[in-house]
Image (cartoon, helix red, strand yellow):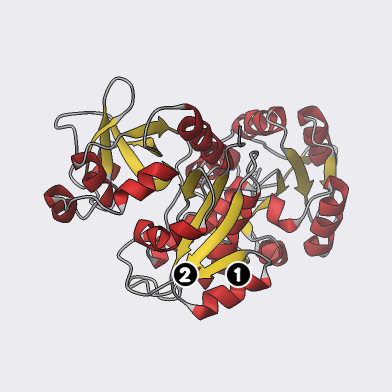
Amino acid sequence: MKNKTCTILIPVRMGSSRLPNKPLKDIAGKPLLKWVIELAQNINFKATLKVLTEDKIIKDYVDSLGVDCFLTEKLHKNGTARILEIIDSIDSDFIINLQGDEPLVNPIDLSNLYETIKSGDSDIASICHEVDNLEAADPSNVKVVFDMNQYALYFSRSKIPYGAKTFYSHKGIYAFKRAALEKIKFLRASFLANFEDLEQLQWLENNMSIKMLITTNKSIGVDTQDDLIKAENALLSNNIKALICDIDGTLTNGLVWYGDKGEVLKSFNVKDGLAIKKLLSKGFKVGFISGRDSAPLRIRAKELGVKFIKFNQVDKKIGCLELLSEMQLEVKNVAYIGDDESDITCCTLIPFSFAVKNCHKDLKKVSRFHLEEKGGEGVLNGFIEKLNFLSTNPKI
């Protein structure tokens, strides 16, 4: 018996009306399309990968990456139509349609889609995730309702079902049986598909079955400049494995007291201590950096189990580079939090940078994110909340 085979197809084009030249837009240091290609290359099942485009500039770029690319006709209404043009050239039993503007799809979701379409009896499989009432109100968030066996009943840009507290947003990523694509070529036109501008309604109206998989991964489709920024923040946050944090003015309120014998006294917030222990328990590496050195700083680092420390740093950028070397991490894997002018070089070095609420005005200009907490008021809790909010797969 012939082994079943799979091909992942990425339909993509330059002509986005809301975000021109979208596939080659830089996002966190590389083109959007490259992120999508790389996630398809990181799956845990065997599949052939091909890109479909009507634009020679994209074909030339994909060719330079060593990935197969088909140059298709122009004016296709959607990715499925582009796939149907070249389907006779694909010798696979299963086809996965991965959108070229979805850089945050979890490869595990692709694996689950493949297993579902390979072993199940549905024509098509797709994914969805839970959204709140506010997200569901957005017409660009396509909602899906399904039966008790998770087969799709209807898709809509409206909030469905009426009166619900929980909604499911559909992601336009599909796994097809080859026979399903052959059938789609000859389907009758669909009033509902035209009305909602959703191709999958044509499939439902023609009695094709779509199995829905629920994921906790909230990927971000890039259609606008705002989406691009959100996706970039998510890509950065998903890669964070460590935190380097300034102390004076960040973990303290910046005030210094002296005891009767001239010893330095500083006040730390217990909330930050609990947050550090939480980070360490999740496998994060934590480093402290300061332009000063004092017994309270070293005592605080020791009692919290922070092993990566750089004190008395005239140039904090040098200290950050040394901490990165000791942690065996790159700048893309680390977050930084600071409060003053001396932190500017670090926030310039490290893309995923934060400034406390009462930071220096020049630091606010260069830091990527701004916390709601002032120094010494539990800034690390704010950092964790922000990190989880930005990530498509929160881990703390």
Dot 2 falls on a residue whose secondary structure is strand
Q: Position of residue 20 (x, y in %)?
A: 40, 75
Question: In the visual, does 326 lie left or right of 142?
Answer: right
Given the image, on which type of amino acid does mark 1 rest? Val
Question: Which labelled disc corresponds to residue 388?
Answer: none
Q: Is residue 105 visible?
A: yes
Q: Which of the two residues, 306 or 114, is positioned nearer the viewer here? A: 114
Q: Which of the two residues, 81 or 19, is positioned nearer the viewer here? A: 81
* Residue assigned mark 1: 62
Q: Position of residue 12 (x, y in %)?
A: 45, 65
Q: Quadrant of residue 395?
A: top right
Q: Is residue 356 visible?
A: no
* Residue assigned mark 2: 53
How much space separates mark 2 and mark 1, taking CA atoms? 10 Å
Q: Which of the two residues, 226 or 63, is positioned nearer the viewer here? A: 63
Toward the front, the furthest residue is 1
Question: In the visual, does 265 lie left or right of 322?
Answer: left
Q: Position of residue 40 (x, y in %)?
A: 59, 51
Q: Residue drawn 53% across and 63% down? A: 51
Placement of 153 over or under 176, stated as above or below: above
Q: Which of the two residues, 310 or 347, is positioned nearer the viewer here? A: 347
Quadrant occupied by the N terminus: top right
Dot 1 falls on a residue whose secondary structure is helix
Question: In the visual, does 286 lie left or right of 233?
Answer: right
Q: Quadrant of residue 128?
A: top left
Q: Position of residue 396 (x, y in %)?
A: 59, 33
Given the image, on which type of amino acid does mark 2 rest? Thr
Earlier along the polypeptide chain: callout 2 or callout 1?
2
Whether pointer 2 and pointer 1 mark residues with C-beta atoms closer than 8 Å, the reply is yes
